[in-house]
Amino acid sequence: MKVNFAPLVEMRGISKSFTGVRALDNVSLEANSGEVHILVGQNGAGKSTLIKVLCGAHHPDHGEFLIDGKKVRIHSVADARRLGIAVIFQEFSLVPFLDVAQNIYLGRESRDSRKMHTEAARLLEQLGIPMDTHLLVNDLGVAQQQMIEIAKALSQNARILVMDEPTAALSEHEILRLFERIRRLKQDGIAIIYISHRLKEVFELGDRITVLRDGCVAATLVPSKTSINELVSLMVGREVDATYRRRFCEMPGEIALETRALSAVNGVRDASIQVRSGEIVGLAGLVGAGRTELLRAIFGADRKTEGEILLGGKRLMEGPEHSVASGVGLVPENRKTEGLALIRSVHDNLLVAALPRIFPNHIYRFRKAARVVADLIERLRIATHSPKRLARLLSGGNQQKVVIGKWLNAGSRFLIFDEPTRGIDVGAKAEIFSLLDSLVAQGAAVLMVSSELPEIVAVCDRAYVMRDRTIVGELQRSELTEENILRLAMHHG
Amino acid sequence: MASARRRIPGIAWLLAVLVLFFSAFGTRFASAPNLINIGNQSSILLLLALPMTLIIMTEGLDLSMGAVLGLSGVVLALLLADGHALPMALAAALGVGTLFGLANGVLIVALGMPPFVATLGMLGVAQGIALAMTDGQSVGGIGSALPGIYASRWMGIPFAIVVALLAYATFHFLLYHTRVGTYVFAIGGNREALMLAGVPANRYHVLIYAIGGLMAGAGAFLLTGRMSVGHPTAAVGMEFDAVVAVIVGGTKLERGDGWLPGTVLGVLTVGILKNGLNVMAVPSSLQIASIGMLVIVALLLDSLRERS
Amino acid sequence: MSSFAWRLLGVLLLCVVLTLSSSAFLTVGNLLNVLRQASLIFLIASGLTLVILSAGLDLSIGANLGLSACLAAAVIKATGSIAIGIGAGLGCGMTIGILNGLLITMLRLPPFIATYGMLWMVYGINYWTMAGNTIYGFPAAFREIGSGYLLGMPIPVLLMVLSLIVGAVFTRYTTWGHEIYAIGANAEVARLSGIPVRRRLILVYTLSGAMSGLAGIVYLARLNSAEAGIGEPLLPARHRLRPIGGTSLFGGTGSLGGALIGAVILTLVLNGMNLLTISGNWQPLITGVILLLAAGIDTAARKWNESQA
């Protein structure tokens, strides 16, 4: 690792407010050339605002920037780019129906199209992922799209790369490759500022860690001198034990849901699983193994072609309508597009699945609706000052609570979760798991997909592992370790 | 390459079937004069459908094109009838069209009005002005220069078709080989990304609507030449046909997924259907009914193929 | 101020302006006329509002009205029975609506295309079956629907009030109404929440069709004659109606009260132009400008709300 005398990039005393809300308060952050500096903090702590300020999208109220020890001005995105700062956001900045080269050079198109393509191809090769630059981005997978984003940054001669939760949508395997590339970039002297919710990564990859809390810097530490618990305590502002401890289910009840040789139009083949009431059963596997597809097939979101689904011993009729009426609820991976109607209020979202149940004679009564909603908001501790607030404005954790609340309202006894804690900060994560815990303690059953293996190990009573769209194994509590899961998930029989 | 390549779409098959059908059952269908007729009549629609493709790719819509075409035609005719020179009158017509296009763009991009509503309002405004200026009557006496140009042939090809071909070539180049075209894909596909890349997306977005208005003016040039008069409601409803041609041709309504060659196929399909039915002396009422069927069948084909 | 309030203000303003500009405005006769006109527009608008709430479109209403009216006319003449004729007209409207619904839900056609295609088909069938003829001269009892009074109100106005009440109750006080709002906001979320989206959409288009049919019958009763082009004068007005009435074209927000105000505003404008003998040529311009104003206010209000959040 090369070390220069002055940090490559430095932000000093940055403050930023939005209509009366202080998003950043005197924040200072620096990164050396060849360093991976990891930024952690809860949702709303100010991480996104900070990087938006750095890349020129927001203008700070106070503070200054230094590159190589010299003061610079960042008034626009173009300024930041010229200074060598490149940001890769979680929602990629790629245009689906343009090809790879056009995306890399968006806004900087050259007259010579062939030269553009050759350059792009060279960049991608250097990164270690050669690909046909004439392919449309829409036809590529998430991991490849991410590489294109990195190539885009490098093509701008970026010396400072900011990555916002880059591993959120990647499989374990792809994450390892990403880390390899990041290490290579380090050797080239690039400073990397990396935001993550996955604390394990922090220790694997980070040279330094900065914790943000409520818009201020809580601490800047070196990984070898700290622990996950300390980080979490700093993020939350109090003592916290980071790993959720669950009291596992000793005596599961009746079989709540069973599938027999289930196959569906989305590619799932011959899947047979059982979930008993009182259990939280995990569904693990690599990206593309078919986990989401299985969940959707069970819920009826995608049509089944063969096999059976039994709920409480009885055949479940096809389609979301029947699933919901029978007490099954699905909390999807994309909560913003499939779980909630963002333009509607918390009130409306909480009621949308429960209308036939709460108003069996089809007459909507406002007072009863308001009462039911108020109860639920209190019970789940959904942070909103009014039930009329638009769902769009809630934080990730609260949005997830609304989705769960929607199913509780609908009387669901069998809940299916697809990545329940994605994009949710540590504090809210714990709340959600404790919620699941209390639900199953009362006899509900939960089937849960998660790409975070530690989560599955910490929370599930049992787990099935999928590969190639079918179930390849089941792990009981005593066998449930990350190694075992990975072994089953990756084995090429 | 953001490309002009696709699997052969359902519409192409439909078109082939239509051509075969009419050639077999309509005695005059496949004759040279009739094919030229189809070309002429489709040309104007193509002039509208080309910019409409770009507009729909950016998740927009322009319902005012027909009315703007009418207004431009009226302006053109009035100026010619008043003795002004053709180039100047043409410039005025194009100017009027572009002005309305710009207005649409400003309402939609700068003010954030939904395109359906904004262009519907401008439709009323354009229509209203045209009607008020002419009291609902045709404007004649435009002289023989314009009709003469319309009737002329260039290397044996009728003027209107030449214009249509040139227009297509221009738009094809624009969309697939220029920066503006790239930005059209980007505005529809991921506008944020474009802005983060430092490109003033709004400017290009407004430009797209302005181009639409310009082409409406160009359409007025052809239509007035053909009819030898300017009439305020001559092109009423043409924008709907243009939308149908674009969508039936395979351009999707969102995410910047557009296919320009498909638009040509869509326009031809509408034109051939109308013409073929005429040739077979099908009563005009049934012709209208068939267009409805056509639209539905073409999309049905596409959606079936996508699902398989 | 809520968008509803703005529009109410607009109505009042218009009334004031018209009263001042024409002595003929504030007479009982004229006002009744306005209401009668508005009621026709509103009947169609109420069905259309439901469609828009579900984030759809129904471009076929003009042709629907025409065909339903002509069919009702033909049946009355053929059977001599008003009841069967009305039944036929309503049935026709509903059938077209059901077909639209099926095209959109089963064949997954975008509403724009499906209803536009249907528009042409229905027009075509209408013109072809009418073959240029006009059917006229209906029994007095039938004509009462258009010109008669009941409970002191003109029957069309009574129908309007009824449909307003039924519609408002449906959208606000029934679960079906709330489900339609949910579908308009995000159809996939609605589906994944157990709402039978297809059934509701078919319902919505059927209702829209039925209301077009009803409007056709009322129109027929007033005109006392039917010919193929019967729906056409009303056509442009309806499309401009919705945004003026405040129903967002993105679905999920809007109300019947808003549609009513839209109908009233439009009719006031037409009435005013009549009284002031402004040529009909100016109508598109005036309605276009009002539309832009209404949409502009809406858009500005939405942006204001968002910045406050």
Image (spheres, coloured by chain):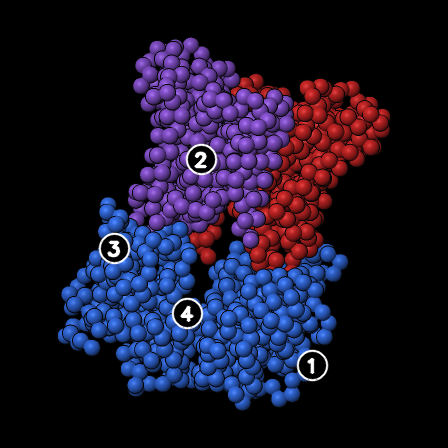
Distance CA(mark 2)–CA(mark 4):
41 Å
Specify the amino acid type for callout 4.
Leu
Which picture quadrant has residue B21?
Answer: top right
* Spot occupied by residue C295 in the image (x, y as percentages of width and height): 49, 40
Q: Secondary structure at mark 2?
A: helix
- Viewer-side residue, B84 vs A376: B84
User: At 42% across and 57% down in the image, what residue appears?
Assistant: A139
Specify the amino acid type for callout 2.
Val
Chain letter of the residue carrying label 1: A
Q: Residue furthest front?
A: B24
Above or below, comparing residue A332 to residue C246 in the picture: below
Specify the amino acid type for callout 3.
Thr
Specify the amino acid type for callout 1.
Glu
Is there CB contact under 8 Å for labels 2 and 3?
Answer: no
Q: Are marks 1 and 3 on the same chain?
A: yes
**Mark 4 or 3, closer to the camera:** 3
User: At 30% across and 74% down in the image, what residue appears?
Assistant: A180
Which image quarter is the N terminus of chain A in?
bottom left
Q: Label 1: which residue?
A: A254
Chain letter of the residue carrying label 4: A
Above or below, comparing residue A296 to residue C152 in the picture: below
Which color has been applied to chain C in this rendered view?
A: red
* Rendered image: mark on residue A233: none
* Spot occupied by residue A467 in the image (x, y as percentages of width and height): 50, 73
Q: Secondary structure at mark 4?
A: loop
Q: Label 3: which residue?
A: A118
Chain letter of the residue carrying label 2: B
Q: Label 2: which residue?
A: B264
Q: Label 4: which residue?
A: A170
